[in-house]
Image (tube, helix red, strand yellow):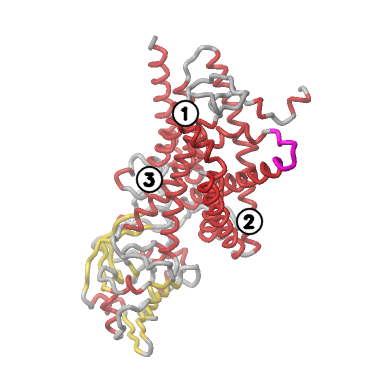
Amino acid sequence: MRATRVLLGAAGVAIAAYGVSLLLDLGFANLRATLEWLVGGVLLHDAVLAPLTIVVGAVFVRARRAGLRIAPLVIGGVVLASVSIAAIPVLGRFGERADNATLLDRNYLVGWLVFAGVTVAVSLVLLVRGRQRP
Amino acid sequence: MKLEALAPPREADFTSRLRSPAVAARVGVWLGICFVIAFVTGLISHEAHVTHPFVGFPTRPVWLYRWTQALHVASGTAAIPLLLVKLWSVFPKLFARPPRRITELAVESLERGSIAVLVGAAIFQLASGVANTAQWYPWGFHFRATHYAMAWIALGALAVHVAVKLPLIRSVLGSPIESAEHDRPSTAESGPLDRRTLVRGSLLAAGVAVLATAGSAVPVLRRVSVFGVRSGGGPGGVPINKSARAADVVAAALSPSYRLTVRHGARSVELSRADLEGLRQRTGVLPIACVEGWSANGTWDGVRLRDLLDLVGAPRGRDVRFTSLQQHGPYKVTTLPSQFADDPLTLVALGLDGEKLALDHGYPCRLIAPDRPGVLQTKWLDQVEVL
């Protein structure tokens, strides 16, 4: 296993170094804009999103201590939150253009309400069925 | 508020049994699969875009690029919930106390550095990729080149991470998921659900994310893809990326003096739209497949490109340069490799779905070749030049 690890690690360093060289070839202005997003993404996760999950997690833990079997709600929350994050670009319609009706051609807000409604409804049904079971 | 409430948390403050290597390794395996699929399909897309690829891009099957690019976007979309759960499961490690001995500190600093690169690159790739699918560019970097460079950095950092963690990964995956053997000492809280349910839940979220977006490429999913960027609307059932107005070609495209120039060395012909309609017409079903992951099949009518090249006596095996009427933009001039130029399916299209080509689809005429990225299917053709 040691040889595998050394080989894999060395290959990883070489592959990443090639990526860095490609990035440097794109010029300083491009590099600065890239680094802003690279660092910004990590900060957004570590300083905003992760603390939020701690707050929500604390609520779930309290509910669990109160004797509720809330696993379906937690999973519903994971689905709802993560898919909503993936849908931010269409929900915000940031790429919309007046001269192109074929782009972003759905009502995403209605879509999100349907998605959220189905997710919450399924979670609640599973929650109730779980509580009925002995 | 007490002062210690303002202090950052310590690793021991995280008590959930779910934040464990058992969850991180299992979600990580799926996340790694998604990243490798995205990397390989991304390389294929890169090969399709560059003028001089490492290996010549194939012309068959005609739907190859359509499906590799749909797979690229789907695997990236699936990775979003998986990455979020994975980062959640390892978050306490961020607050681990650094070791005191200098050699251990150096090793740990290196490992943390590699993880910072991996996390940064992973978030960067998924965020920039999903924004690109919706044509949202809120940044100052060149998307395609930077996304490509960052893919190598992400893959390299992933390989280093797996190399560092391999003994732990093997040991964790070899034990039952609920085993406490590899847990942090502070994990006592039984939590509202078991680990297996969390892993299955994150896979469910990944699947839902794909179903909710894949309708842009998979027509049968259009009704359930509530977050799809395209629903197959548009003239002839084919969506549009750049309109004639955005490309600033309306006047030139509708001008009665429009002529398509076909040139090979000193020989050239100039053809009006009526001249093109007078040549032998062919019909073919070919997809438009964009780098953003959406695609649609069209039934195109037009003149076989090879027939036009024969008009100026061009030999086979030559690349062909296409120039659009559009005045600016990176795809005003594109080069079609010879295998596509000589392919009997490659058309200079005059019509779509039995109707005259719409202005936004490239009227008076456009290139449509099998198995090519959409941006290289040059619209509003001005010149065709044999190289």
At 30% from the left and 79% from the top, the residue drawn is B316
Mark 1 Cα shell of 10 Å, populated few (<14), some (14-19), many (≥20): few
Judge left or right: residue B339 versus residue B323: left
The answer to whether one can see residue B127 in this image is no
What residue does disc 3 label?
B214
The answer for how far apart the CA atoms under marks 1 and 2 are is 44 Å
Dots 3 and 2: beta carbons under 8 Å? no
Give the vertical position of B28 relative to B13 (above or below).
Answer: below
The image shows residue A109 at horizontal and vertical percentages of 46, 38
Mark 2 Cα shell of 10 Å, populated few (<14), some (14-19), many (≥20): some
The answer for how far apart the CA atoms under marks 3 and 1 are is 36 Å
Dots 1 and 2: beta carbons under 8 Å? no
The chain letter for the residue carrying disc 3 is B
What residue does disc 2 label?
A33
Dots 3 and 1: beta carbons under 8 Å? no
Location of the N terminus of chain B by quadrant is top right
Q: Is residue B104 magenta?
A: yes
Judge left or right: residue A2 versus residue B294: right
Q: For numbered disc 1, what is the local secondary structure?
A: loop
Total labels drawn: 3
Amino acid marked by disc 3 = Ala
Q: Quadrant of residue B278?
A: bottom left
Which contiguous range is marked in magenta? B97-105
What residue does disc 1 label?
B175
Q: Quadrant of residue B372?
A: bottom left
Judge left or right: residue A48 versus residue B362: right
Judge left or right: residue A91 versus residue B259: right
Amino acid marked by disc 2 = Ala
B148 or B138, which lies in front? B148
